[in-house]
Image: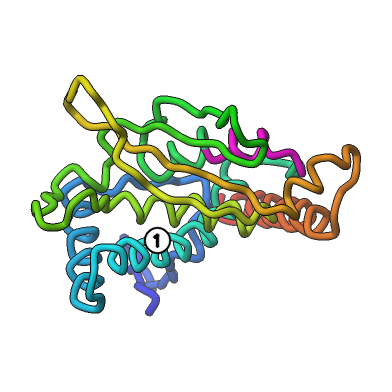
Amino acid sequence: MDRRRKSDGLGPKSTQSFSVLSQPLGNRREVSFSAYALLFSEIVQYSRKRVRSTTGLEEKLNDIGRRVGSRALELVAIREKVPTRSTKVLQILSFVFNPVWKFLFGKQPENLRKVSESESSYFIEERDPLVNTFVSVPEDYGSMNCAAFVAGIIAGVLESAGFPAKVHAYNANDSERTYPPMTLYTIEFSDEVMAREKRPGKRTMLNILFSVGVFMGTFALATNTDTLK
């Protein structure tokens, strides 16, 4: 529902409508950390009541994260003014590693590396994920990691960009037991993606539609900004 603000001064009172849709996308508003932690805690509690195992809980969190990631791709692309989307794996991973991560969590993970034994596998290292800050995993839950939610976000972004992949979150085997602990996000791209990787210089229809969508979104943003002025 629109909120209406009355003008000051003498004369007839005028009204002006305001809504979320009327605000330019460039005005990013930070969410308080306490509110973020409370919301994620409720997500974990909601998911825990609907599964029967820790594996099921991780899968549930991963599924919720996928929905977040699929919606985050276009928004981040427009705000970061990305003109096109490449079909190259390293470029989409860099997009996830830098602008997407900073947009969602306000920081950048530690490392992005390739698994030497596999052409289709990569992993991202993150120390002390934001979602795990106030999460205490019971001992009988074993190595369960709530960062499965973040893994789902990564998978959602990649899938929406045309790079379907299996993404999982694991606790790193840290022999020195340093604190805070390290989380590994393993990314294994599908055979379709790797086959396309070997065909340089070709753009899929999805790639073209994405580029047109970003252009139209940027044009609408500029028009909206001029109107508000």
Question: Residue 212 location in percent, x, y?
Answer: 79, 55
On screen, residue 122 versus residue 29, left or right, reads: right
Q: Does the magenta portion include 94? A: yes
**Percent x, y for residue 13?**
36, 73
When the figure is inspected, residue 102 is found, relative to residue 141, above or below; the finding is above
In x, y percent, where is residue 92?
Answer: 64, 40
Label 1 amino acid? Asn
Residue 160 is inside the magenta segment: no
Colour scheme in use: rainbow
- Residue 106 sits in quarter: top left
Name the residue at the top extreme. 176
Tell me the crowding category of disc 1: few under 14, some 14 to 19, or many 20 or more residues within 10 angstroms, Cα based. Answer: many
In the image shown, does 78 or 198 lie closer to the viewer?
A: 198
Q: Tell me if residue 68 comes above or below residue 195 in the rendering.
A: below
Magenta span of residues = 87-96
Pick the residue in front: 97 or 112.
Answer: 112
Based on the displayed image, in which of its 4 quarters is residue 15 positioned? bottom left
- Circle 1 — which element? helix
Residue under the point 26% across and 48% down:
131
Seen in the image, is 138 located left or right of residue 129?
Answer: left
Point 61% across, 46% down: residue: 77
Q: Work out whether residue 107 or residue 6 is closer to the camera in this orientation and state it.
A: 107
Q: Residue at x 27, y 53 (%)?
A: 146
In the image, 210 versus 165, the foreground residue is 165
Mark 1 lies on residue = 62
Eyeballing the image, is 59 above or below 88? below
Residue lying at 29% horizontally and 40% vertically, measured from the top left: 171
* Residue 70 on image: x %, y %: 54, 61
Magenta span: predominant SS is: helix
